[in-house]
Image (cartoon, rainbow, N blue to C red):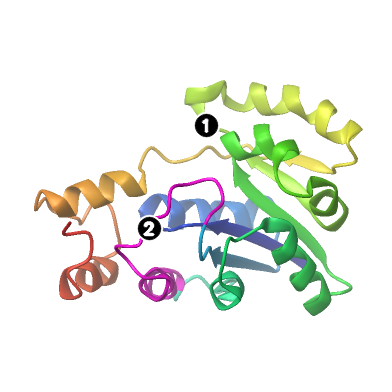
C-alpha cells in the first residue's frame, strides 16, 4: 500500500488542513493517509493550554467523513518531543512492506536536513513538500530537491499549495469572539465552544 504520514500540532485542525488532506490523498494516489498529531512538536514553542487529547479529538471529528484518512495517536501515546524519525521507525515496524510518504509544508521541506537523524527519515519514507507562496512557491522546493537527493532522500514536490488559513487565526478568532464557521467544521466549532478552548 501507499501510506501517507501527515504530522503537525493541529492546534486546532481547520478547514485548510481538511482541504489539504483530500488533495494529498488524490495527488499521491494514497491508499491511506495517517494524520499524526504531535505530543510536543520540536519546531514550535509548546502550547499547553489545550491538551493533546483535545487536539486528537478535534482531528478525529474533522476527518471522520474522509474514507482514506485516519488519525494515528502514535506520537501522543509515546509522549515527549515528537521526533519524526522515531515515528517513521515505529510505522515501518507496523507496515514493513508498504511505501511511506512523509508530507510536510514548505518551510519544513527546506530545513529537513537539519532535523534529528534526517538520514533515518530519508531511508524510511519519500519526503513530499507542499509549496507555499510566501517562501518562494513551488520553485523553491524544486530547487531544493537536488540537494536533498544528494543526501539520500527520495523527494516529491506536490502541485498543491498550503491553504491561506492558519491555526493561529482560529485561536485568535476564538479569543475575540468571532464566528468560527469559515475556519473549522461545524462539529469542531461546537467542540471548541463546549470545552471553552483557546479562551486564554
Question: In the image, what residue occupies the spot 57% across and 58% down?
Answer: 7
Magenta stretch bounds:
41-63
Question: In the image, what residue occupies the spot 51% across and 60% down?
Answer: 40
- Numbered disc 2: secondary structure: loop
Report whether residue 36 is seen. yes
Residue 142 painted magenta? no
Quadrant location of the N terminus in the rendered image? bottom right
Vertical comparison of 177 with 194: above or below: above
Q: Position of residue 16 (x, y in %)?
A: 40, 49
Vertical comparison of 2 with 158: above or below: below
Q: Quadrant of residue 10?
A: bottom left
Residue toward you, 63 or 198? 198
Which of disc 1 and disc 2 is earlier in sequence? Answer: 2
Residue toward you, 7 or 60? 7
According to the image, label 2 marks what residue?
11
According to the image, label 1 marks what residue?
132
Q: Position of residue 29 (x, y in %)?
A: 71, 58
Residue 59 painted magenta? yes
Q: Position of residue 183 (x, y in %)?
A: 27, 52
Amino acid at each position: 500500500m501507499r501510506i501517507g504520514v501527515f504530522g503537525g500540532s493541529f492546534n486546532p485542525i481547520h478547514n485548510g488542513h481538511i482541504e489539504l488532506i483530500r488533495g494529498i490523498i488524490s495527488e499521491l494516489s494514497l491508499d491511506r493517509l495517517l494524520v499524526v498529531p504531535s505530543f510536543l512538536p520540536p519546531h514550535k514553542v509548546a502550547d499547553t493550554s489545550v491538551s493533546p487529547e483535545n487536539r486528537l479529538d478535534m482531528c478525529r471529528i474533522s476527518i471522520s467523513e474522509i474514507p482514506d484518512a485516519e488519525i494515528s495517536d502514535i506520537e501522543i501515546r509515546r509522549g515527549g518531543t515528537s521526533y519524526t524519525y522515531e515515528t517513521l521507525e515505529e510505522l515501518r515496524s507496523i507496515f514493513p512492506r508498504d511505501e511511506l510518504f512523509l508530507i510536510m509544508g514548505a518551510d519544513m521541506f527546506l530545513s529537513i536536513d537539519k532535523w534529528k537523524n534526517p538520514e533515518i527519515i530519508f531511508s524510511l519514507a519519500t519526503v513530499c513538500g507542499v509549496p507555499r507562496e510566501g517562501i518562494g512557491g513551488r520553485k523553491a522546493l524544486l530547487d531544493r530537491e537536488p540537494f536533498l537527493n544528494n543526501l539520500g532522500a527520495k523527494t516529491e514536490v506536490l502541485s498543491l499549495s498550503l491553504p491561506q488559513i492558519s491555526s493561529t487565526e482560529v485561536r485568535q478568532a476564538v479569543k475575540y469572539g468571532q464566528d468560527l464557521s469559515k475556519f473549522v467544521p461545524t462539529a469542531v466549532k461546537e467542540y471548541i465552544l463546549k470545552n471553552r478552548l483557546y479562551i486564554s
